[in-house]
Image (spheres, helix red, strand yellow):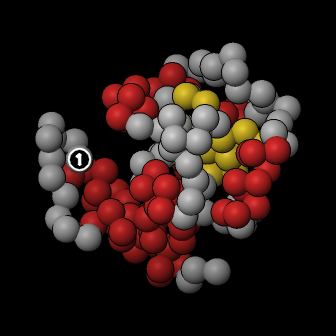
Amino acid sequence: RASSRNRAMAVALLMCVRLSMVGAGARLPRGTMSGVRAASRMLYSGPSYDIRSVMEEIKEGSAQLVDCREKWEWDAGHLHHASFCPLSELVMGSLPADVQPDQKIYVHCKAGVRVHKAAPLMRQLGCESVIPIQEGFVDLVNLGMPLAGYDD
């Protein structure tokens, strides 16, 4: 469990990154996103998971995988079995028809940060069990999650 000081530092880091991204085309210093992911993990206190078990649950159909990245990110490549549910639509109160609210849902994004905004929004929209995946898109591919089109 993170100390109060570490939590405060994590919140400050996330706020700084968010502020730096306000400008169009803002570039972050090298290594910033790994710090953001670490800060994000430090602040998250939800259920833990084993990525291999997650992949098995999704493959068996006992859980869903939801991608909360935006359309241009989805179009550039997405994970096999993932449902498209961009954060921008969740903010507007829209849940895609293919998302089953009564099923366990694992939600992922590019860097493991947006999931912490998407998960509570999904819960507000009636999803019973939403688990944010801390790993980003590239990390998930590197861990063995198949890309759509390669394992169809």
Q: Is residue 123 above or below residue 56?
A: above
**Image location (x, y in percent) of residue 89:** 51, 22
State the residue in front, 144 or 90. 144
Residue 93 shows in this picture: yes
**Label 1 sits on residue:** 21
Residue visible at 56% across and 59% down in the picture = 144
Name the side, left or right, on which 146 lies relative to 72.
right
SS at circle 1: loop
Name the side, left or right, on which 31 lies relative to 117.
left
Q: Is residue 138 above or below residue 101?
A: below
**Image location (x, y in percent) of residue 119:** 63, 43
Under mark 1, the amino acid is Met
**Image location (x, y in percent) of residue 143:** 54, 64
Name the side, left or right, on which 152 lies relative to 19.
right
Sort mark 1 into few (<14), some (14-19) or many (20+) by Cα contacts within 10 Å: few
Residue visible at 31% across and 51% down in the picture = 18
**Image location (x, y in percent) of residue 113:** 46, 53
Q: Is residue 74 above or below residue 17?
A: above
Q: Quadrant of the N terminus?
A: bottom right
State the residue in front, 151 or 104. 151
